[in-house]
Image (cartoon, rainbow, N blue to C red):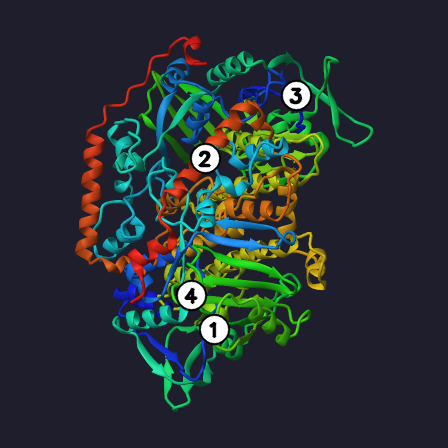
């Protein structure tokens, strides 16, 4: 039973250290992991120094043995219940994509069909009023779900607003404690084995030469290593033309519990609430922007798209594999999912490329379905008369997204494909938020009279309102020393 | 099934449902073994399980025994349930492969409660508490499909379905390629907004009237005929179906309360009807209850299962041999998808596209799973098996097999009927030995692992032995009147 034992992770940042920490804990004792850190480089998974995550990161942290309260205290993280999208349709309109189900399924009928039925007959509360996470965020209240699947709190999840550098410090401590070696350097070139053409070693600019059996590219958008072994790349910038990001910190507090994503003339601005202030991250599309060069110099550039992440004995994780703006908070999620698939398909010593094909199939599907959700925000915008927004509204949706839009419009159905990160509720929130209203609700909703449907809505509202009232007001934790974070 | 489901589930749509059926045309009754999903279908229709079993002479089913598939003399059970439990988040079979290589593991079936219970002729309904071994399986039925059809007819008629006796002699297709109506041999014309083609292999509406073509999959699934002959019961009914590979196909054995269903699914390129019939009659365990009945089929599926205002359900939509008891399931999936996409607001091609996409996935994935049974064999003792062993297989299947052979990983998809345990059952049961297993499993010390697996094996034996005998269970809960 031989697997690739010597592993070189090229590039640190969140992708590099998440990978290092997980592999060091998961692989058998004979592993030998070295991480080639490049402290001057931009992050390998997050386009901005502050990140708004999905709920999935919490299980990743738990698997690493990190205590959540201590982690949050050490990094100054705050809770996130979803994203508020401001100005993507009418300029004064906002909607929330909550980490939440809407209402509850009754007799096999999804809630939105009941809501549509009641709405067709007359007045009804906004759809968002039936999402616990949206209601809690609006009231500024938060409590972790209590874990009971029968409780209404089980319909809700949460993510984090993170200081990326602080998070990396925690990951680094875990990795080093589990035996990961660290060196500093900048990737320069690959050296191929003469027999099979696989990468035998990487050379760094300072002359260091590092041999390994498996190389993981965590060099970020530059994709230096994977780019040296394959030049193929899918470009998504016609659908997603935003290519520039810049961050500013502000002492002005932002409303807690939600990330705000406000559409601007040339892109969008993300605002993350932290204790004692907020982070503003401006994303813009340079081809529709005329910023002066001085202002532009401080911005980070990127191009949306993806590569096949596994080529030979090189595997790209993070931005070196997939570049997508963090409109839905997927930067760290893609790292996490790459690592988890890597563990399932961990490279064997004498192997065909069937594992690589499977890995690439899954990662491609996953990246493309996330891409589709991002495209939906642009494609379905209502901001007329601004070049960026007119151009993206005129693009043609990828087939899977086109099918989602068609079926939702006609009958409120969301078809799902392999490796969807976002399940039905997220698509419904987005489509409803962009004023895409189904023409028909599901015929099965007719097993309820209008009065029964109305009563079900009222019951859900009452349950959720009571659950929110029982939650304490959200307060940000005070930052604690780093050493207390790691359990084992 | 369609009439019963639509009249129950869409009762608030004021549908006007007519079912046209001719007593002069026989029905195909091979689909007598089912998979657990049928229980959800019956539950949706409000059918009481014990009453249903009693009315259809049903027995319970924990899986299918496959004999002589990998090699002559081999036997394995494809159970409705999992093997073991994950340890350290790594699927059980990786640990098993590791110990197996050291000669320290028993047959994989010994770590599956439904396999052990089936071999011992024992049965109990599963529990829901995930902490219990009794929650690690599910069950289905072996029943008389003719009695089920009669039962569903009564169910449908009490819910307003009108049955018209007669044969369809003409179909009127309008300008948009939609069916306007059908004329019966009585001269009566039945009009409708939506037509459901349950005419069987013939595909009277979808094929003959609308001209929708058919993908022929004979190159991958060479069997094209079957001969069926039920016999008297001579021993207590087993809680499983049996599929025995014969010289030019395979034989089914489905024990019901009042008889045993038998038949031979064969390839006419390799054996004559008479020889096939003699072969199956020659191995009957009891007296035959009727003369052998022959069936012909073309394995494959319609290019489109929903065209215009016509939806094909059942054999008109395609045919996959009943090796994994999927015939009734495919009907059920089509009905579920039709209800999901029901054109209450009028015919919209968007609905048909989605219906067809989902049915294509279902058919293609089951097809691959069936082909695996023929492809994964070492048998070269007859021309038929030599052909199967060496034939081309769909690329989608070859890729799945390559991944499993390399490292014991079962490819993951969102949709499709058969999940990891099913693929494992057939791969391992038919001697596809992975060259490697999950390297992460090496973190667990081998002796601790061996102890944990032996404990599991023993508690499975104890749990199985504490279950009632299947025959007693059936007699107590649901004996036929």
Seen from the viewer's position, the closer of residues A139 and A464 is A464
Question: The disc numbered 1 marks a residue on which chain?
Answer: B
| Disc 4 target residue | B348
Q: Are marks 4 and 2 on the same chain?
A: yes
The alpha-carbon separation of the residues under discs 2 and 3 comes to 44 Å
Mark 4: few/some/many CA within 10 Å (<14, 14-19, 20+):
some
Measured as percent of width and height from the top left, residue A46 is found at: 51, 26
Vertical placement of residue B164 versus A126, above or below = below
Q: Indicate the chain on which mark 4 is placed.
A: B
Q: CA distance from mark 1 to mark 4?
A: 33 Å
Tell me the mark number nearer the camera, choosing from 4 and 3: 3
Disc 1 versus disc 4: nearer the observer: 1
Of labels 1 and 2, earlier in sequence is 1
Question: Are discs 2 and 3 less than 8 Å apart at CB?
Answer: no
Q: Are marks 1 and 4 in contact (CB under 8 Å)?
A: no
Secondary structure beneath disc 4? loop
Q: Quadrant of residue A358?
A: top right
- CA gap, disc 4 to disc 2? 57 Å
Q: Pick the residue in front: B273 or A165.
A: B273
Would residue A124 appear left or right of A281 to someone viewing this image?
Answer: left
On the image, numbered disc 3 is attached to which residue? A8
Query: Can residue A88 be seen in this snapshot?
Result: no
As helix, strand or loop, the secondary structure at mark 2 comes to helix
Query: Crowding at label 3, few (<14), some or many (≥20) Cα neighbours within 10 Å?
Result: many
In this rendering, the label closer to the viewer, 1 or 3: 1
Q: Secondary structure at mark 3?
A: strand
> Given this view, does label 2 or label 3 mark the residue nearer the observer?
2
Mark 4 to mark 3 CA distance (whole Å): 55 Å
- According to the image, label 2 marks what residue? B458
Instruction: Return the residue at label 1.
Output: B28
In the rendered image, the quadrant that contains the N terminus of chain B is: bottom left
Residues at discs 1 and 4 both on one chain: yes
């Amino acid at each position: 039973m031989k697997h690739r034992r010597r592993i070189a992770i090229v590039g640190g940042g969140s992708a590099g250290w998440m990978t290092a920490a997980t592999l060091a804990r998961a692989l058998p004792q004979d592993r030998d992991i070295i991480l080639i850190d490049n402290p001057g480089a931009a992050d390998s998974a997050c386009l901005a120094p502050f990140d708004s995550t999905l709920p999935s990161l919490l299980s990743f942290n738990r698997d690493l043995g990190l205590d959540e309260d201590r982690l949050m205290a050490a990094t100054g993280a705050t809770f996130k219940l979803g994203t508020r999208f401001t100005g993507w349709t009418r300029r004064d309109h906002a909607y929330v994509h909550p980490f939440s189900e809407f209402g509850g399924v009754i007799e096999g009928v999804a809630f939105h069909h009941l809501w549509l039925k009641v709405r067709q007959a007359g007045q009804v509360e906004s759809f968002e009023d039936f999402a616990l996470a949206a209601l809690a965020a609006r009231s500024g209240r938060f409590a972790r779900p209590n874990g009971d699947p029968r409780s209404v709190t089980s319909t809700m999840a949460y993510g984090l607003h993170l200081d990326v550098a602080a998070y990396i410090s925690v990951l680094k401590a875990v990795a080093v404690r589990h035996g990961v070696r660290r060196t500093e350097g900048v990737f320069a070139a690959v050296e191929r084995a003469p027999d099979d053409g696989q990468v035998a070693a990487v050379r760094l600019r300072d002359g260091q030469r590092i041999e390994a059996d498996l190389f993981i590219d965590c060099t970020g958008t530059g994709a230096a290593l994977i780019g040296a072994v394959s030049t193929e790349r899918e470009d998504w910038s016609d659908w997603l033309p935003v290519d520039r990001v810049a961050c500013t910190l502000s002492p002005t507090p932002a409303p807690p519990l939600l990330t705000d994503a406000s559409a601007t003339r040339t892109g969008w601005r993300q605002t993350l609430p932290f204790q004692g202030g907020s982070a503003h991250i401006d994303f813009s599309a340079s081809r529709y922007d005329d910023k002066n060069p001085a202002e532009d110099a401080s911005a980070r550039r990127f191009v949306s798209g993806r590569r096949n992440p596994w080529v030979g004995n090189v595997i790209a994780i993070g931005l070196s594999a997939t570049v997508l703006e963090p409109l839905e908070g997927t930067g760290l999620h893609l790292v996490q999912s790459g690592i988890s698939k890597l563990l399932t398909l961990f490279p064997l010593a004498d192997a065909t490329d069937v594992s690589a094909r499977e890995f690439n199939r899954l990662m491609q599907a996953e990246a493309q379905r996330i891409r589709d959700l991002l495209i939906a925000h642009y494609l379905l915008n209502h901001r007329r008369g601004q070049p960026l927004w007119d151009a993206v509204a005129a693009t043609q949706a990828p087939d899977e997204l086109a099918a989602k839009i068609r079926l939702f419009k006609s009958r409120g159905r969301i078809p799902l494909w392999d490796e969807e990160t976002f399940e039905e509720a997220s698509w419904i929130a987005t489509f409803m938020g962009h004023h895409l209203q189904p023409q028909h609700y599901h015929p099965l909703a007719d097993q309820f009279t209008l009065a029964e449907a109305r009563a079900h809505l009222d019951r859900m509202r009452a349950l959720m309102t009571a659950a929110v009232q029982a939650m304490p007001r959200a307060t940000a934790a005070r930052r604690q020393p780093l050493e207390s974070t790691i359990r084992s | 099934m369609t009439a019963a489901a639509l009249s129950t589930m869409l009762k608030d749509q004021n549908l006007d449902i007519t079912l046209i059926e001719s007593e002069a045309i026989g029905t195909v009754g091979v689909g007598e073994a089912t998979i657990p999903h049928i229980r959800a279908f019956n539950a949706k229709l409000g059918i009481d399980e014990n009453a249903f079993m009693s009315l259809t002479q049903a027995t319970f089913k924990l899986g299918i025994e496959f004999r002589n598939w990998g090699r002559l003399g081999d036997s394995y059970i494809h159970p409705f349930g999992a093997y073991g439990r994950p340890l350290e988040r790594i699927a059980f079979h990786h640990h098993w492969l590791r110990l197996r290589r050291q000669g320290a593991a028993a047959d994989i079936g010994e770590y599956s409660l439904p396999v052990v219970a089936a071999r011992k002729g024992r049965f109990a309904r599963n529990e829901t508490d995930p902490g219990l071994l009794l929650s690690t399986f599910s069950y289905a039925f072996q029943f008389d499909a003719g009695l089920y059809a009669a039962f569903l007819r009564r169910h449908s008629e009490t819910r307003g379905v009108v049955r018209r006796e007669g044969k369809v002699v003409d179909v009127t297709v309008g300008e948009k390629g939609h069916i306007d109506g059908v004329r019966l041999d009585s001269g009566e014309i039945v009009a409708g907004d939506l037509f459901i083609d349950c005419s069987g292999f013939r595909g009277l509406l979808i094929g003959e009237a609308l001209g929708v073509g058919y993908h022929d999959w004979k190159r991958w699934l060479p069997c094209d005929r079957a001969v069926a002959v039920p016999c008297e019961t001579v021993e207590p009914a087993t809680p499983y179906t049996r599929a025995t590979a014969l010289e030019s196909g395979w034989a089914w054995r489905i024990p019901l309360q009042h008889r045993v269903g038998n038949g031979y699914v064969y390839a006419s390129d390799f054996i004559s009807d008479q020889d096939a019939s003699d072969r199956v009659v020659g191995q009957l365990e009891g007296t035959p209850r009727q003369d052998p009945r022959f069936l012909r089929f073309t394995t494959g599926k319609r290019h489109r299962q929903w065209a215009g205002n016509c939806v094909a359900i059942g054999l008109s939509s395609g045919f996959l041999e009943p090796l994994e008891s999927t015939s009734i399931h495919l009907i059920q999936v089509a009905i579920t998808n039709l209800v999901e996409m029901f054109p209450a607001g009028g015919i919209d091609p968007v609905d048909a596209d989605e219906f067809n996409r989902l049915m294509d996935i279902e058919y293609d994935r089951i097809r691959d799973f069936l082909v695996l049974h023929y492809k994964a064999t070492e048998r070269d003792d007859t021309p038929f098996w030599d052909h199967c062993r060496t034939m081309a297989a769909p690329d989608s299947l070859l890729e799945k097999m390559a991944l499993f052979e390399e490292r014991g990983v079962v490819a993951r998809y969102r949709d499709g009927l058969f999940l990891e345990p099913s693929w494992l059952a057939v791969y391992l049961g038919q001697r596809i030995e992975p060259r490697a297993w999950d390297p992460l499993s090496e973190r667990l010390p081998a002796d601790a692992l061996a102890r944990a697996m032996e404990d599991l094996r023993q508690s499975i034996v104890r749990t199985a032995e504490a279950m009632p005998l299947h025959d007693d269970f059936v007699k107590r809960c649901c004996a036929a009147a």
